[in-house]
């Protein structure tokens, strides 16, 4: 049986306290969503939004529980603020903050230590795709970014081709299927079919209401990580509806 579809919204550096109105509008339109929904606002809003209609996640965490790390927040702090999950290793963190696979692995361990679901992001650059290196890149990221101890309950993996994020461009359905089949097999070889079969594999990169249904119909796609379209109730709601 396929795991329940998850539609996760990554608000990035967008959103103020008043953005709670968007979540209220979304909840009114989708009182019983046909899928799991996760909203990942900036960390300043986690405590304000937690306990509302939708589970709340962070967008990053440090690998230490506390200490002299100015500007960082720990997984324990996110959990304390009411988060149930955290995005780790987003390509913008990897590019803007030099996050390596080893750091992503440490952060994933920290998320699990704090009882959070880790949404670990992987994805190739356009140059890597053009060079025919997509599967090799995804394989090495999966191997080095995910520590031992993964379960179907504590891990979600998001495949986000870097060149598809915020660009309006998406891979073909066949290209998405190829990567998702590869990720399932890779996780299966390492963690066993039972665990790997339950890990949600999300696609991310320019998902919108108009392309969500065909993406969700791909075998081994168990949902989406949504950036820009998660900021508007109508668009995010349209993607949630497409999961039905
Ligand atoms: C993202 O950054 O996780 C993302 C998928 O962005 P977008 O949907 O805007 O391409």
Image (cartoon, rainbow, N blue to C red):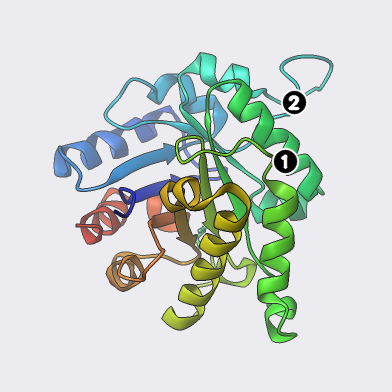
Q: Residue at x 55, y 45 (%)?
A: 12
Residue 24 located left or right of residue 205 = left
Look at the image and tell me whether residue 99 can be seen. no
> How many tags in the picture?
2
Residue 5 located left or right of residue 160 = left
Residue 143 spot, x, y in % from top left: 71, 54
> In the drawing, what numbered circle is on residue 105?
1
Figure quadrant of residue 185: bottom right
Question: Is residue 232 or residue 211 the one in the foreground?
Answer: 211
How packed mark 2 is, by other alpha carbons closer than 10 Å (few <14, some 14-19, many 20 or more), is: few
Q: Is mark 2 within 8 Å of ligand 1?
A: no
Do the residues bearing badges 1 and 2 touch, measured as CB atoms within 8 Å?
A: no
Please name the residue that numbered disc 2 is placed on. Answer: 71
| Label 2 element class | loop
Q: Earlier in the sequence, mark 1 or mark 2?
A: 2
Q: Residue at x 38, y 35 (%)?
A: 19
Residue 23 spot, x, y in % from top left: 30, 36
Residue 177 located left or right of residue 95 = left
Question: Is residue 180 or residue 210 the one in the foreground?
Answer: 180
- Quadrant where the C terminus sits is bottom left
Residue 31 spot, x, y in % from top left: 15, 37
């Amino acid at each position: 049986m396929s795991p329940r579809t998850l539609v996760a919204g990554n608000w990035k550096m967008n959103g103020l306290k008043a953005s709670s109105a968007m979540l209220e509008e979304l909840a009114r339109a989708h009182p019983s969503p046909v899928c799991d929904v996760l909203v990942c606002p900036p960390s300043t809003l986690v405590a304000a939004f937690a306990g509302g209609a939708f589970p709340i996640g962070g967008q990053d965490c440090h690998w230490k529980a506390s200490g002299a790390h100015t500007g960082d927040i720990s997984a324990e702090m996110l959990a304390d603020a009411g988060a149930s999950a955290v995005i780790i290793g987003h390509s913008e963190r990897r590019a803007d903050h030099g996050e390596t696979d080893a750091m992503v692995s440490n952060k994933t361990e920290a998320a699990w230590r704090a009882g959070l679901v880790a949404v670990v992001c992987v994805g190739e650059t356009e140059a890597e795709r053009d060079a025919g290196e997509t599967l090799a890149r995804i394989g090495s990221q999966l191997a080095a970014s995910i520590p031992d101890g993964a379960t179907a309950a504590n891990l979600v993996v998001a495949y986000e081709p870097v060149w598809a994020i915020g660009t309006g461009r998406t891979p073909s359905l066949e290209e998405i299927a190829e990567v998702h089949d590869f990720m399932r097999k890779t996780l299966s070889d390492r963690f066993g079919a039972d665990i790997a079969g339950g890990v949600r594999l999300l696609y991310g990169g320019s998902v919108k209401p108009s392309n969500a249904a065909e993406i969700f119909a791909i075998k081994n796609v168990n949902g989406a990580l949504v950036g820009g379209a998660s900021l508007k109730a109508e668009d995010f709601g349209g993607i949630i509806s497409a999961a039905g």
